[in-house]
Image (cartoon, rainbow, N blue to C red):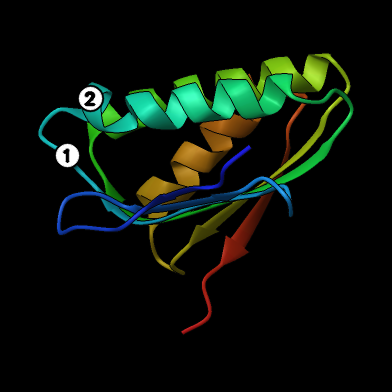
Amino acid sequence: MENLLIEATEETPEIKFDCKRNLLEISGKSYPENTSDFYKPVFTWLKRYLRSSDNMKVTVNIALLYFNSGTSRVLMDFCDILDEAATFGSKITLNWIHEEDDEDSIDFADLLQEDFKLLRLNLIEKEL
């Protein structure tokens, strides 16, 4: 399976999914005009990747400096897919990387932790 690499723009994050290392990374800012269109190939890749093997260990690093409400919904859907994979035996670690004083980001991570019990979620304060 091919890795997925989407370069960052002013409105969209960098997405690096490395299937050989089982490392999925999303970083930057996310406020695309059409969130669904932007993330559609990401979801397609993710579903194919997770179906390729049961019981895999996957690390997901999300470091979004800013994201809009459309991205919030997408992140919930993204975590739904990860959570479903965890029900089939995959070990998913989600590292939520945030700035020290970003209460909105921390609150969103807390919401993810409440909703997705099978994901191991780590809050990591971004080093400056």
Number of numbered callouts drawn: 2
C-alpha distance separating marks 1 and 2: 9 Å
Image-based side of 14 in relation to 106, left or right = left
Give me the disc on residue 37. Answer: 2
The residue positioned 72% from the left and 47% from the top of the image is: 22
Q: Which residue is mark 1?
A: 32
Please name whichever residue, 61 or 106, is drawn nearer the observer in this view of the structure. Answer: 61
The residue positioned 53% from the left and 59% from the top of the image is: 97
In this view, 109 is above or below 38: below
The residue positioned 47% from the left and 20% from the top of the image is: 77
In this view, 20 is above or below 40: below
Amino acid carrying mark 1 in the image: Pro
Image-based side of 68 in relation to 20, left or right = left
Residue 34 percent location from the top left of the image: 14, 28
Amino acid carrying mark 2 in the image: Asp
Question: Mark 1 or mark 2: which is in front?
Answer: 2
User: Are there few (<14), some (14-19), or many (20+) residues within 10 Å of tag 1?
Assistant: some
- Check contact, mark 1 vs mark 2: CB within 8 A: yes
